[in-house]
Amino acid sequence: MHEGTSTEVLIASVSDLHTDFAENRDDVVKLALAIHERRADLVIIAGDVSHKNERIQRVLQAFAETVPRVAYLPGNHDLWFDVPDAKSQPQLDTWVRYRQELRALSESAGAHYLPAAPLYLGSTAVVGSCGWYDYSLMPASLRASVDPSVLESKQYGGLQWSDARFIAFRDRAGALMSDEGVARVMEEELRAQLAEADQRPEVQQIVAVTHHQPFYEVVTRTGTLPWEYFNAFMGSVGLGEVIRSSDKVRWAIYGHTHQVGRYQLGPITAYGTPLGYPRERRGLDAEALLKSRIGWIEL
Ligand SMILES: [Fe+2]
């Protein structure tokens, strides 16, 4: 029981900490202290800490020292290989980074690695997958007008989505996988975790965590280019279908977008509280930072 309240379990969440920026490293300390002060039982880190292992490790350790339990889910940035063109190097496979390297790093820092297994906290289960994108979150009319090869190259008007250079998901034969193929694997990973958590009689509510966005409704729409083109890389509708397939899911936490958002989608509260890049929160004072960049679940 938390002091002065009837809360039994308190869960905090953060995402898109992007600690390659010094300013963000300072703000992560503020977030960790605030979460510590409210005596959260668990903090969920929903991806995009850094592509550098030592930075990810430092952040996980800092939270592990201030909060009893830490659940880490990598984002696409965390999965990046620090090379000019990962696809041209056959020994680099993002699945190895996702399933082995980051898992080992997370566990050595004292954090629960969410893609490996659900985390159970009394009657609550937390399930998670990085998720991926299959272009289903861009407006259908725009998608119909763009050649699939252009989407696969992730380029538009001289701009390129950086995953094109630093990500290389391969199949068992070593061939590069399509984005849609990766999205399906991530969705199945989440489906398996949900099925496991769902059938446990003690689990009464489930928190689903994805780095990529799981619902069309939570995507920021500007109606302008190139924004709507790049919404292709925000996530997949299939992730949301998996989340909605269990009626125990009451929260869906996502990262990836740097737009703070909160949506009630039937029984599910979906939200993102990204820290984002320093330029995106210029003028935000410390109080507003703590209010908008930490998500809370009180049980
Ligand atoms: Fe991301």
Image: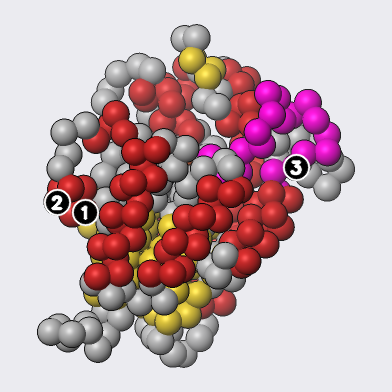
Mark closer to the chain start, 2 or 3: 3
Q: Is mark 1 within 8 Å of ligand 1?
A: no
Q: Tags 2 and 1 in contact by the CB under 8 Å rule?
A: yes
The stretch of residues the image draws in magenta is 75-95
Q: Nearer the viewer, residue 24 or 270?
A: 24
Q: Nearer the viewer, residue 141 or 96?
A: 96
Secondary structure of residue under mark 2: helix
- Picture disc at residue 93: 3
Could you tell me which residue is drawn at 28 percent across and 54 percent down? 30
- Picture disc at residue 287: 2
Q: Identify whether 39 is placed above or below 89.
A: below
* Distance Cα–Cα, label 2 vs label 3: 41 Å
Could you tell me which residue is drawn at 22 percent across and 84 percent down? 2
- Picture disc at residue 290: 1
Mark closer to the chain start, 1 or 3: 3
The mark tally for this picture is: 3
Q: Is mark 3 within 8 Å of ligand 1?
A: no
The stretch drawn in magenta includes residue 82? yes
Secondary structure of residue under mark 3: loop
Q: Identify whether 30 is placed above or below 138.
A: below
Few, some or many C-alpha atoms within 10 Å of disc 1 (few <14, some 14-19, many ≥20)?
many
- Nearer to us of marks 1 and 3 is 1
Residue 290 visible in the picture: yes
Residue 21: x and y in percent read 41, 36
Q: Tags 1 and 3 in contact by the CB under 8 Å rule?
A: no
Residue 243: x and y in percent read 44, 61
Could you tell me which residue is drawn at 87 percent across and 43 percent down? 173
- Picture disc at residue 34: none
